[in-house]
Image: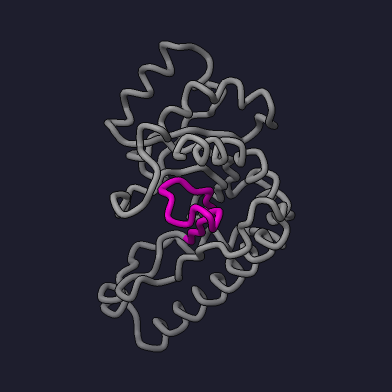
Amino acid sequence: MEIVRADFQLFDREYFTFKQLKAQHSEKELEEIKQEYKKHWQKWKAIQMAVADGLPKEFHMEKPKIESWTNGWNLRNHFWCAYRDPAHHNQNACLAVLLNKKQFQVYLMFQHYKSEERSGSLAAYNDLLPTLAEWYLQVESKNYFIWPQTEHELDDHLPLTAFLEGKSQSDKWTDSMKGRSFQLGKLFFQTDALSNVVEETIHAMEELAPLYAALDRTDR
């Protein structure tokens, strides 16, 4: 399976709400947009199910949470999928995969939405920051980026190498989190060849898994 330019371009549109789309398009055109979204989403779902099937069995992530292509009122401006160990299915932290008009990303995140209803503290999650330098030595460094959760997903994120260059840089960046969390992951852009997306996703998730597992130990 592969991610091609058309998969990114699906989200390169001005309007996403059905109210706006109905004002700009005929019923036939709107139906064509919906069918195009459904087609790309079915491909997205197939990719995630193939990833889940290919992950090490000890990850216990055979049932990822694949977000729908619409929330009822809007087309999504990205496709998103979360992977959690079912033993900690209600944990705030998760491994996730996202595709928007700019990039495909595999990343570790803290889900702030309704976080009070799930387990895992923000402080424990952010305590991972000092461990990243050591973790980084065990992975393939290419394409890893880090960004504050408050930063828009289409902004240019900071390469992890730059974050780790010096303490002053890290401290300055940490302040930008504004009491929230960080996100860390492997990013592939429209210009990147991603003909083996399932394998690349599995590999990135295997690299990120020790950080996710460390949170499990912290929250016990």
The front one of 131 and 76 is 131
The front one of 139 and 192 is 139
Q: Is residue 34 left or right of residue 196?
A: left
Q: Residue at x 70, y 45 (%)?
A: 203
Measured as percent of width and height from the top left, residue 79 is found at: 48, 61
The magenta-colored residue range is 79-97
Quadrant in which the N terminus is drawn: bottom right
Residue 179 vertical placement versus 166 (above, below): below
Name the image quarter holding residue 93.
top left
Q: Residue at x 65, y 60 (%)?
A: 52
Specify the farthest residue to the bottom. Answer: 28
Residue 72 vertical placement versus 159 (above, below): below
Measured as percent of width and height from the top left, residue 45 is found at: 58, 68
Colouring of the image:
one colour
Q: How many marks?
A: 0
Does the stretch in magenta take in 81? yes
Does the stretch in magenta take in 219? no
Measured as percent of width and height from the top left, residue 170 is found at: 43, 18
Name the image quarter holding residue 210.
top right
Q: Residue at x 27, y 72 (%)?
A: 20
Name the image quarter holding residue 62.
bottom right
The front one of 193 and 29 is 193
The front one of 90 and 83 is 90
